[in-house]
Amino acid sequence: MSRTRPKALITHASCAIGLVYADRLVRRGYDLVLLTHHRERPATLARDLRRETGAAIDVSVTDLTREHGLQDVEAALAGVDLIVNNLELPSAGLLAQGHTSGLDRLLDVNIKAYARLAAAAAASMAGRRQGAIVNVVSALGLAPGIATGAYGATMAFAIALTRTMQAELSSDSVYVQLVIAAATRTDVWPIGNSPPELLPGVMSPRDFVDAAMTGFDLREPITIPSLAEIGSWERYEDARNALLFDIVSSDPAPRYRKWG
């Protein structure tokens, strides 16, 4: 029997954002593959959603830091219509603290796995000339100096990767959405058990995902759920493009000319 429902794959599905995406996509008619390190919460949600909607939902406990786990997911992407690439880990600590196992895991998940899954999804969807890729990243990728350790750098990588994917896949009928999260109440933010009412400006996962999916429906290339004035982003882009134009020169800048 041929599959009639579209299929979505959600990474880091045990976190708050992943769980809300699962709920919203099932109610839009998707079957799901939920990748997770912790089965309990996504398995409970999957049981409820199967009962309510009849959707097929597979909960897979997968370690994407291991090659065989990554290869299994890459192979599964061949039959996926939408991937929500929600891989994100907190900082592994200050760089001055030296090499740690946490740094290895941060790089393996936020860079290696993020890029491998994005590339596999892009190849599959471009070949079919259909599909959508949603990359969820932290706004710290726009201001890495605020973050500690390599975390902000991994988010900057994810932002740059997504923009490249948008350029590469624009002619292949594949939609790529970059979703940038500011302060959002997830498992890794706020740090510790700080109650949300003490932290103004922290968005709920439900509001974040609902706004992101509205941006998805509008086919926005970049969705920032907390940004009220889109002109701020447009000015940022204009300034970035102007800077790129200004730095293309065969001559050193006058302030560096100490000769002649």
Image (cartoon, rainbow, N blue to C red):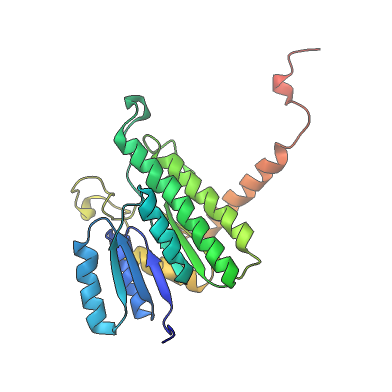
Q: What residue lies at 39% left-to-right and 54% top-to-bottom?
A: 70
Q: Is residue 51 depicted above or below 150 in this figure?
A: below
Q: Considering the image in quadrants, where does the C terminus appear?
A: top right
In the image, taking residue 193 as reference, residue 86 lies left or right, namely right
When the figure is inspected, residue 142 is found, relative to residue 55, above or below; the finding is above
Q: How many marks?
A: 0
In the depicted structure, whether residue 247 falls above or below residue 204: above
Which quadrant of the rendered structure holds the N terminus?
bottom left
Q: Would you say 28 lies left or right of 124 here?
A: left
Give percent across and percent down for residue 103. 35, 36
**Where does residue 224 sit, x and y in percent of width and height?**
46, 59
Q: Residue at x 19, y 69 (%)?
A: 44
Q: Is residue 137 visible?
A: yes
The reply to whether residue 87 is in sight is no
Residue 16 occupies which quadrant of the picture?
A: bottom left
Residue 154 drawn at (x, y percent): 44, 43
State left or right for residue 220 relative to residue 99. Answer: right
Picture residue at 66% right of the left edge, 66% below the top: 171
Place of residue 51 in the rendered image (x, y in percent of width and height, measured from the top left):
22, 82
Q: Nearer the viewer, residue 12 or 222?
A: 12
Pick the front one: 55 or 255: 55
Query: Residue lying farthest right?
Result: 260
